[in-house]
């Protein structure tokens, strides 16, 4: 294509023509209307949403943390039935929520007034009020939910948590400097400022290129929130048209407030600062309403070049621009000469408070990878991007707080851990679907992009894998006669010959009990009986079960893998433990449900996936064995009053890794505690990880929908004599009830005399 050289006059004429076209476009009437301010503005960042929060029947308001959840969503408590979206009322026997319009489950939902009938004595949700009708009983399948919560505005987790401001609550000295710096005639002109455009056109004409925009606050708001940063006439035309739409739909005060809450004001502590409320806290350690005139003018001055004019990097340059803003305020009559003189005499002295990001940084990395894998080249490209996750924001906050508290307690109680690389990881899954409810891959204060120990930290799980040895034994036992929960196992010294030499496993306490039942062996986490069980069924068969539940083994793994001498991640352990909740199927964890454009056009969807790993009856029985571990075995530190808990501890060789894994209600959770450098933690799973697991689950399980693992029809209960492993009449001394799969019962062969004890697995 031939390049045409234009004279200055030609360029000027073209600029004037383009300007006229732009003006004409802006002045054309437009039928486009906005449903809401946010819909109109769009966003140039990814929006990451939590899952809709279920409000199930049968739970109490306190169990669901309903007040806390609503306040986290920005709802306002009122003293009577709500009259507008965003309000809620908590009474003795009723609870009203006026849910805002929102997007969930891939579609838009209108605002809805929800009335819940409460049991007065307990606060339990028992019914629902509908307009003009008496309360109706609330069935468990009735779907009531709260709107999703915004988890992050960037998949990178690099944005500071926004501190929103209300224009009506700000003194004029705080917001007037912004208008003085960016759009002094904001309340006088329409969507575009013809005078500013003319001034910009002259400047552009003199420069021969577009160097000044003359944009109004409204145009800037649209540009900042939706369009690219390139200065082109096409972009200016689009801004002008959409500005007309915006000002037709919303008042000036609403637009200015949205601008104040979204304007970019640099980076502090590696986090992007958006909004004057966030900036006031980040740069001057005070609420926006308490900013002095000098401080407010400094923030307004930064808008022109947020990083170049940062008070943390170049206070002198910022002071020059700030003083210009103050001078404009005096010219406009918005500040007296005395006020301006006092403000200009004040040096720019930041008192920074590094902002926080409540974004779950490790989880966001996982979400980002899932999105980019499914919808490559779509994320963060500047046209709006919506990610609907499976995360329960309340559980995520519980997990983050529990990790922070547990790490602090361990450092306080164990001086040797102070200054070490002590850390932890937590993952919680929906026991019914595998959806990721919460995940913390390390210290919650880790910076964005930090190592995610949930998915990437391969550590030895220790005894937390023993339930899978029992599962293979009760399920198929490598083609041998399956064992039962009352099978008798030798607990005596053992030596196994291997090609690499002999192996002599030892019990953790170096004691031997002679003979133990399989239930006792698992509950007390006996090493030697576990090895004998795996040897009886075949190490290869046991390895096959490990592979089916997702615990990968190296080729020709040594037999010590049955005691946890393998490397795996907390996520892999959580996936494996879902086999006891389903029972028999392994659920594939997934953190994302849907990815869509800003306007809601779906780009990708995720569905729950699972695979069969074991017989449901066998998995159910092993889950019952894990209940014994919590009630009277090594996992008592995970016991929670009123909850049916099935769990297992794990401690790796040398006490380097501490684990706690299990299921209660509709939640499967795994906790790992250890040192990043692989050093010795010196604590068992029960001591280090158990309290963290219990704290998380005590809050998480009641806050989620109820769920009980259903007993398969071929699982029966019989009484067994503990000493012999034989069936006896119910209630006989020295006996207890036991679960069996039909066909695997330890039947008596002779009715006229006692049988010999069941054989011992050597």
Image: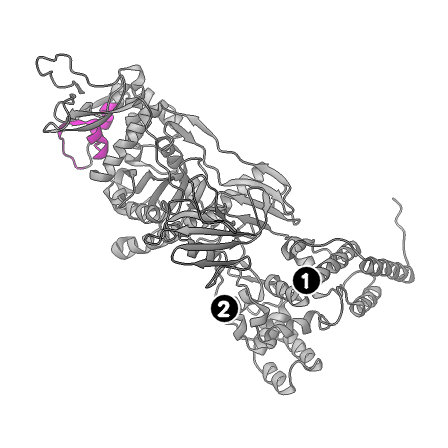
Is 762 on the left-hand or right-hand side of 581? left
Q: Dot 1: what SS?
A: loop
Spot occupied by residue 350 in the image (x, y as percentages of width and height) = 52, 72
Residue numbers of the magenta segment: 509-533
Spot occupied by residue 651 in the image (x, y as percentages of width and height) = 27, 39
- Give the quadrant of residue 213: bottom right
> Mark 2 = which residue?
352
Determine if the magenta segment contains residue 515.
Answer: yes
Determine if the magenta segment contains residue 544.
Answer: no
Most foreground residue, 432 or 108: 108
Give the mark toward the camera: 2 or 1.
1
Q: Residue furthest left?
A: 753
Residue 348 visible to the viewer: yes
At 57% across and 36% down in the image, what residue appears?
A: 605
> Mark 1 = which residue?
250
Spot occupied by residue 754 in the image (x, y as percentages of width and height) = 9, 16
Most foreground residue, 300 or 91: 91
Most foreground residue, 725 or 500: 725
Spot occupied by residue 558 in the image (x, y as percentages of width and height) = 31, 26
Mark 2 or mark 1, which has the lower sequence index?
1
Is 632 on the left-hand or right-hand side of 420? left
Task: Judge whether 228 appears above or below 433 on screen.
Answer: below
At 20% across and 18% down in the image, what residue appears?
A: 746
Residue 376 visible to the viewer: no
């Amino acid at each position: 294509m031939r390049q045409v050289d234009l004279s200055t006059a030609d360029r000027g004429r073209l600029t004037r023509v383009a300007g006229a076209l732009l003006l004409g476009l802006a002045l054309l009437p437009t039928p486009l209307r906005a449903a809401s301010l946010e819909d109109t503005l769009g966003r140039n960042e990814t929006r990451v949403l939590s899952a809709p929060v279920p409000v199930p029947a049968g739970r109490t308001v306190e169990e669901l943390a309903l007040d806390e959840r609503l306040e986290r969503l920005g709802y306002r408590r009122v003293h009577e039935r709500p009259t507008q979206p965003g309000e809620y009322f908590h009474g003795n026997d009723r609870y009203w929520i006026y849910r805002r319009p929102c997007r969930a489950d891939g579609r838009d939902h209108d605002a809805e007034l929800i009335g819940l009938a409460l049991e007065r004595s307990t606060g339990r949700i028992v019914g629902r009020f509908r307009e003009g009708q008496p309360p109706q009983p609330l069935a468990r399948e009735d779907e009531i939910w709260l709107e999703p919560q915004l988890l992050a505005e960037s998949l990178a987790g690099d944005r500071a948590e926004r501190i929103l401001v209300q224009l009506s609550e700000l003194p004029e000295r705080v917001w007037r400097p912004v208008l003085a710096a960016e759009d002094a005639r904001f309340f006088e002109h329409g969507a575009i400022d013809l005078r500013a455009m003319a001034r910009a056109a002259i400047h552009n004409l003199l420069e021969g290129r577009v160097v000044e925009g003359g944009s109004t606050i409204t145009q800037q708001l649209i540009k900042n929130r939706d369009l690219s940063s390139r200065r082109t006439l096409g972009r200016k035309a689009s801004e002008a048209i959409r500005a007309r739409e915006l000002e037709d739909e919303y008042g000036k005060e609403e637009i200015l407030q949205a601008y104040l809450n979204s304007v970019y004001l640099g980076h502090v502590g590696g986090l992007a600062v958006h909004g004057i409320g966030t900036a006031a806290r980040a740069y001057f350690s005070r609420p926006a309403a308490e900013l002095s005139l000098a401080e407010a003018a400094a923030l307004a001055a930064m808008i022109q070049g947020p990083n170049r004019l940062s008070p943390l990097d170049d206070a002198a340059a910022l002071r020059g621009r700030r003083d210009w803003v103050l001078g404009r305020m005096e010219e406009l009559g918005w500040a007296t000469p005395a006020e301006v003189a006092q403000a200009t005499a004040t040096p720019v002295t930041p008192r920074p408070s590094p902002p926080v990001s409540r974004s779950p940084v490790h989880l966001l990395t996982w979400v980002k990878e899932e999105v980019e894998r499914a919808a490559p080249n779509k994320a963060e490209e500047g046209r709006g991007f919506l990610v609907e996750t499976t995360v329960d924001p309340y559980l995520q906050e519980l997990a983050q707080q529990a990790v922070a508290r547990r790490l602090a307690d361990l450092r306080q109680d164990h001086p040797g851990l102070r200054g070490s690389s002590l850390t932890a990881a937590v993952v919680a899954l929906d026991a019914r679907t595998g959806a990721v409810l919460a995940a913390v891959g390390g210290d919650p204060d880790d910076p964005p992009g930090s190592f995610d120990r949930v998915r990437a930290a391969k550590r030895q799980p220790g005894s937390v894998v023993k339930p899978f040895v029992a599962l293979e034994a009760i399920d198929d036992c490598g083609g041998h006669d399956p064992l039962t929960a009352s099978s008798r196992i030798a607990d005596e010294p053992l030596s196994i010959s291997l090609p690499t030499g002999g192996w002599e496993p030892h019990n953790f306490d170096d004691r031997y009990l002679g003979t133990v039942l399989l239930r006792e062996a698992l509950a007390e986490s006996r090493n030697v009986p576990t090895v004998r069980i795996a040897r009886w069924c075949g190490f290869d068969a046991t390895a096959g079960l490990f592979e089916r539940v997702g615990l990968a083994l190296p080729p020709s793994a040594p037999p010590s893998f049955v005691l946890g001498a393998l490397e795996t991640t907390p996520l892999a352990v959580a996936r494996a433990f879902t086999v006891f909740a389903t029972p028999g199927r392994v659920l594939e964890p997934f953190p994302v449900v849907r990815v869509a454009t800003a306007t809601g056009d779906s780009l990708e969807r995720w569905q729950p996936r699972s695979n069969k790993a074991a017989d449901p009856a066998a998995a159910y029985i092993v889950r019952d064995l894990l209940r014994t571990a919590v009630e009277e075995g090594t996992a008592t530190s995970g016991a929670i009053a009123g909850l049916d808990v099935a769990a297992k501890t794990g401690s790796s060789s040398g006490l380097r890794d501490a684990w706690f894994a299990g299921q209660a209600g509709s939640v499967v959770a795994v906790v790992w505690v250890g040192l990043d450098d692989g050093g010795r933690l010196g604590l068992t799973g029960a001591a280090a990880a158990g309290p963290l697991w219990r704290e998380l689950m005590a809050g998480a399980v009641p806050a989620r929908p109820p769920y009980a693992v259903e007993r398969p029809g071929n699982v029966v209960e019989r009484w067994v004599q503990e000493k012999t492993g034989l069936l006896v009449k119910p209630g006989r001394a020295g006996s207890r009830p036991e679960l069996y799969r039909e066909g695997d019962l330890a039947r008596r062969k002779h009715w006229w005399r006692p049988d010999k004890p069941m054989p011992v697995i050597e």
